[in-house]
Image (cartoon, helix red, strand yellow):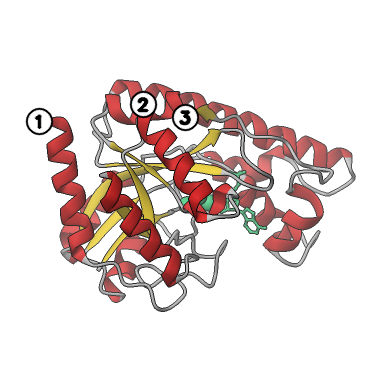
Amino acid sequence: MVDLHVHTTHSDGSYSPEALVALASKYDVNVLGITDHDEISGINPAMQAGNHYQIKVISGVELSIEYNLPEPGHFHLIGLLFDPVNPSINKRLSWLREARRNRAFEIINKLSALGYPVSAEEIEDDLKYGSIGRPHIAALLVKKKVVSTIAEAFSKLLRNGKPAHVPKKKLSFAEAVKAVHDAGGLAIMAHPNSLGFKTYPELGEEILKLQKAGLDGIEAYYSRHDRYFTEWLIKFAEKHNLAVSGGSDFHGQAKPDILPGIGTGDMNIPVSVYENLIKFHIKKYT
Ligand code: AMP
Ligand code: FE
Ligand code: FE
Ligand code: ZN
């Protein structure tokens, strides 16, 4: 089976690329797309490990998009099958990484000013690979016994509207699509359920608008999509010539109910999804 949406220690996942590939092989994953937030340094080590486990590892990244949506919607764009050494995408990613570092220090300063026992030195290790996010700070707050769970760290302190919240710098849709296309990749809307649209037709209308602006496809298979939504998305993609992708959004600790390949238990993305993405990719770029 296929899983084209997973996170490693190179962003907010708790498994190293090597450990994640080993785990994915236990769940019979044959094709794995590494999609760390704003970070692509986990792809190469995962590819190396993939050779050992006979898993095909493909390039991926997950970008947060600045976009006007109904609350509490958010828009993530997955780039797939791009060239990881392309300078255009790397320039964008460096900018995002720098912004994430600055934001992490701002959050630490806020927490410290609120009287919580955290300091900048304690996130140094998390900065090694670049893409630091709120989950790292949430884990630190658990370790320091400020809160008892990651979820509590978010709901009490880190979420929008809470005392240690700092907004994240994001790319516009046009900037993100350009970075992915410059590097020869496909731009896929991640977990379309998260955009916050109340009805399928409203979401569909938005997808078509985005397709005109460069969107290549949609993540129809996803851990938290029900069967009906997945089927609707697949049909919609067929009708409108959109690529179909899918993945678990495995993080390890940060989302403990989600496993590679099978998601919350019954996801099973056929290898044909990967084969069709390759066909779409070839058609687009030749
Ligand atoms: P950031 O990109 O730093 O804003 O952090 C967003 C990430 O935090 C998401 O990708 C999730 O992995 C994680 N996250 C968001 N909300 C929660 C929550 N309530 N509990 C646990 N993890 C969360
Ligand atoms: Fe995440
Ligand atoms: Fe996401
Ligand atoms: Zn994700």
Give the mark nearest the N terminus, 3 or 1.
3
The residue pinned by badge 2 equals 179
Give the mark nearest the N terminus, 1 or 2.
2
194 vs 186, left or right, is right
Residue at the spot 76% in from the left edge and 41% down from the top edge: 165
- The answer to whether mark 1 and mark 2 are in CB contact below 8 A is no
Residue at the spot 60% in from the left edge and 29% down from the top edge: 169
The residue pinned by badge 3 equals 173
Quadrant in which residue 82 is drawn: top left
82 vs 200, left or right, is left
Q: Which mark is residue 248?
A: none
Q: Which mark is residue 286?
A: 1
Rendered view: 259 above or below 138: below
Crowding near the residue tagged with mark 3, few <14, some 14–19, many ≥20 C-alpha atoms within 10 Å: many
The three-letter code of the residue at mark 1 reads Thr
Give the mark nearest the N terminus, 2 or 3.
3
> In the rendered image, which quarter contains the C terminus?
top left
Marks 3 and 1, how far apart in space? Answer: 24 Å
Marks 2 and 3, how far apart in space? Answer: 10 Å
The three-letter code of the residue at mark 3 reads Phe
Marks 1 and 2, how far apart in space? Answer: 19 Å
- Give the secondary structure at mark 1: loop
